[in-house]
Amino acid sequence: MKIKWFGHASFELKIGNKVLYIDPYKGEPSEYKDKADIILVSRWHYSNCRLELIKKVRQEDTVILAPRDVISQTAGITAEAGKAWDLSEEIRVTPVDAYTINRLQPIPKGTAFGYLIEAEKKTIYYAGNSSFTPEMAKVKADIIILPVGGTFVMDAREAAKAAEIINPKLAIPSHYGSLMGSIDDANWFKEILEAKNIKVLILEVGKEKEI
C-alpha cells in the first residue's frame, strides 16, 4: 500500500491496482495524475472537496462516498456513520462521525465523517475534521491519520492523546502547513508519540511512501 499527501487533508492511497483519493482539495489538477476507483469526501467544504478535482479523476465506474450535501453536487453514495461498504473486492470502508467541540466554526455531529478503510489486512483511520471525541476510544486501526493544526480541529497535543488511546502501529499528521498549523505542529505530534513508542510518519507533499 502506498500513500501520497497533496497537502492539508488531501491524500491518495494506492491499494493493489486500486486508487483511492481522500478529500481532494489541495494541489494543482496536474498533480492528480491517476484516475480514481474510489473517492472519499469527509464534508462539504472548500478545504475538503474541490469539484474540479473530482471531475478530473473520476471515471465512469468511480465510487464516491460522502456526506449528503456533497452527494447533492456529484452522484455517489451518501455516507452513514457505522455502515460498512465493500467498495471493491479488496477494500471495505466504514464512515465514522467527525465533529468538533469548542472550536472555531464548530462542525456539528452528523454533518461530516472520518473513514475506516480496510485493505491488505490493515485498517486505516482517517479522522477528518475532528476534535478529540469519545468515539475515538472505540477505534481499532493499524494506521491513523489525525489532524494536528488546531484552531478548527485537534491540535498536536489532543491528536497525540487520541493516538495514545488508539495505539496504532503508525500515525500520520494532517491538517497543517497551509490553512492552519505548521510543520512545528507535526513535529510536536511526532515528538510526543515517539516518546510513547508510537511510530510517526511526516509526509512530504507530493512524495509517495510505502506504508
Image (cartoon, grey):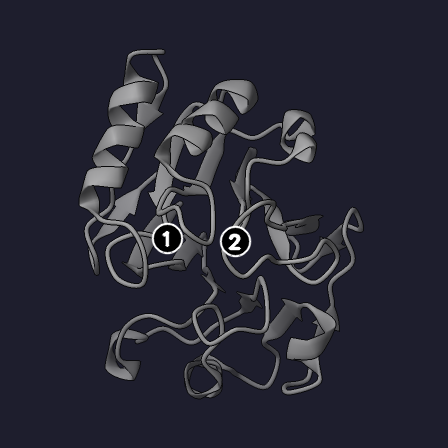
| Residue at x 69% of width, y 57% of height | 108
Task: Name the image quarter holding the C terminus.
Answer: top left
Residue 119 coordinates in the image, percent (x, y): 56, 43
Q: Is residue 157 above or below residue 26?
A: above
Instruction: Bin the neighbour count of mark 1 within 10 Å (Cα to Cα): few under 14, some 14-19, many 20 and up.
Output: many
Residue 157 coordinates in the image, percent (x, y): 39, 29
Q: Quick check: 20 left or right of 117?
A: left
Q: Which mark is residue 129?
A: 2
| Residue at x 63% of width, y 86% of height | 74
Q: Quick check: 159 left or right of 130?
A: left
Residue 158 coordinates in the image, percent (x, y): 45, 31
Most extreme residue toward the top is: 196
Provide the secondary structure element on which disc 1 rests: loop
Q: Which mark is residue 12?
A: none
Provide the secondary structure element on which disc 2 rests: loop
Q: Is residue 24 above or below residue 181?
A: below
Q: Quick check: 76 left or right of 211?
A: right
For residue 91, say whether it is visible.
no
The front one of 68 and 31 is 68
Q: Whole-Å distance between the Cαs marked 1 and 2?
A: 8 Å
Q: Is residue 5 above or below residue 34?
A: above
| Residue at x 40% of width, y 45% of height | 1
Q: Amino acid at mark 2?
A: Asn
Q: Amino acid at mark 1?
A: His
Which residue is label 1 attached to?
A: 175
Asked if marks 1 and 2 touch (Cβ < 8 Å), the reply is: yes
For residue 54, say whether it is visible.
yes
Q: Which mark is first along the chain, 2 or 1?
A: 2
Instruction: Bin the neighbour count of mark 2 within 10 Å (Cα to Cα): few under 14, some 14-19, many 20 and up.
Output: many
Q: Quarter-wise, where is residue 188 in the image? A: top left
Residue 38 coordinates in the image, percent (x, y): 56, 66
